[in-house]
Image: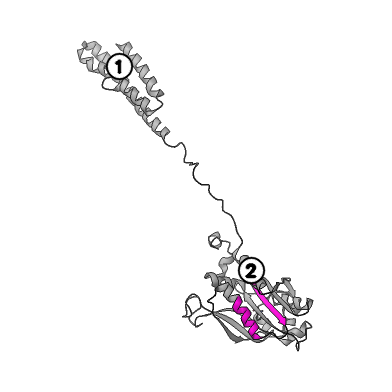
């Protein structure tokens, strides 16, 4: 009887350990541990055995049953683990796109502005960031000692050399190079010694424009800016011209647009005192002294000029509350545009 039990144990172990599927395992369970199995039969028949044999056979049979039961449990969990996907990779899922960079908002707005003005017949001009006194101030009706020089908070590198505080300098260079008529815009980086805050940077971008021809009038300026601002801010944009002073134009104006956040009621963007208007650029008719400085005959030629801050235009259009976001290199900000 003991030998038979040992044989059952070997067979049972083999069947349970080797079960390759749930069906195999169930068959092995029925065969070695089921109600009608040989082992169960032996255990049931113990009571008919003589006492000393009953003890020996009983102990061995119970031992074998416990061993087979534990092998059964092991095999069950082994098969269950195997029936789960072997890894979390699902090859049928679409691939993940690697993050791809794109042009920064400010250069992309600069290109957009260039396209708008190209469409109006303007050529794009560029010039040096490090500029001399003449092109920054002298030729623009700001001789040495002129009080307006101080208002630009210019960085001086040497007495007569500055980081350009506006791209008007590029237009002076353009006028020195070509005879009228002339239509140019000068987009580019400018520098001013400002304390940095939400609405001031010491390094930013401007786009300035200049149109020189015979009989250029304020109406041409208004038409050009109306077209430009409607294309940039939307076809419903309303403009307003307010008299203002710049040494290189006469008359000069500040151009406002009706606040498109509140529709002109006054809000956090346009401020409670603005009456619902946002200042977007400076403009005016070119001063005769500027024409004289570059050798154009002020009796014959007339022209208009304007200049706008690119970051300011961009911040207004996109509702960005702080200029510093543009250059903080935070991808959470940059990927929105
Ligand atoms: N150059 C002026 C500035 O930097 C802008 C401007 C240009 C104003 C042309 C009037 C006409 O602020």
Q: Quadrant of residue 33?
A: top left
Q: Is residue 239 above or below residue 320?
A: below
Q: Is residue 320 left or right of residue 194?
A: left
Q: Residue 110: x and y, percent? A: 63, 68
Q: Residue 197: x and y, percent? A: 56, 72
One can see residue 174 in this view? yes
Q: Is residue 65 above or below residue 144?
A: above
Inspect the magenta stretch and tell me whether residue 132 lies in it. Answer: no
Element carrying mark 2: helix
Q: Earlier in the sequence, mark 1 or mark 2?
A: 1
Element carrying mark 1: helix
Q: Is residue 268 left or right of residue 137?
A: left
Reading the image, the residue beneath label 2 is 110
Mark 1: give few (<14), some (14-19) or many (20+) Cα within 10 Å. Answer: some
Q: How is the image coloured?
A: one colour
Magenta part of the protein: which range?
203-227
Q: Which residue is located at x 67 percent, y 77 percent?
A: 209
Reading the image, the residue beneath label 1 is 60
Q: Which residue is located at x 20 percent, y 12 percent?
A: 48
Number of disc labels: 2
For this rendering, which residue is in front, 20 or 324? 20
Q: Is residue 202 left or right of residue 35?
A: right
For this rendering, which residue is in front, 36 or 130? 36
Which quarter of the rendering shows the N terminus?
Answer: top left
Q: Is residue 277 left or right of residue 295?
A: left
Q: Residue 297: x and y, percent? A: 78, 86
């Amino acid at each position: 009887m003991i030998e038979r039990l040992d044989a059952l144990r070997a067979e049972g172990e083999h069947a349970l350990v080797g079960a390759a599927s749930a069906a195999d395992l169930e068959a092995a369970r029925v065969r070695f541990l089921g109600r009608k199995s040989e082992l169960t039969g032996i255990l049931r028949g113990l009571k008919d055995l003589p006492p000393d044999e009953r003890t020996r056979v009983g102990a061995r049979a119970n031992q074998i049953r416990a061993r087979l039961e534990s092998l059964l449990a092991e095999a069950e969990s082994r098969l269950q683990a195997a029936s789960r996907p072997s890894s979390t990779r699902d090859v049928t899922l679409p691939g993940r796109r690697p993050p791809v960079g794109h042009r920064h908002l400010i250069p992309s707005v600069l290109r957009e502005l260039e396209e708008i003005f190209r469409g109006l017949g303007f050529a794009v001009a560029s010039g040096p960031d490090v500029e001399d006194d003449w092109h920054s101030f002298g030729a623009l009706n700001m001789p040495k000692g002129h009080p307006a020089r101080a208002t630009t908070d210019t960085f001086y590198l040497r007495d007569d050399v500055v980081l350009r505080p506006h791209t008007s300098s590029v237009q002076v260079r353009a006028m020195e190079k070509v005879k009228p008529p002339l239509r140019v815009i000068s987009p580019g980086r400018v520098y001013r010694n400002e304390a940095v805050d939400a609405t001031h940077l010491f390094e930013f971008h401007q786009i300035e424009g200049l149109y020189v021809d015979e009989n250029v009038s304020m109406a041409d300026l208004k038409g050009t800016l109306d077209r430009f601002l409607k294309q940039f801010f939307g076809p419903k944009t309303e403009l307003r011209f307010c008299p203002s002073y710049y040494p290189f134009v006469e008359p000069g104006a500040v151009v406002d647009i009706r606040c498109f956040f509140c529709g002109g009621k006054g809000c956090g963007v346009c401020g409670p005192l603005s009456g619902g208007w946002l200042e977007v650029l400076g403009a005016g008719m070119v001063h005769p002294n500027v024409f004289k400085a570059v050798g154009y005959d002020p009796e014959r030629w007339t022209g208009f000029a304007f200049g706008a801050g690119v970051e300011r235009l961009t911040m207004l259009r996109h509702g960005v509350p702080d200029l510093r976001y543009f250059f903080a290199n935070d991808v959470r900000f940059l990927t929105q545009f």
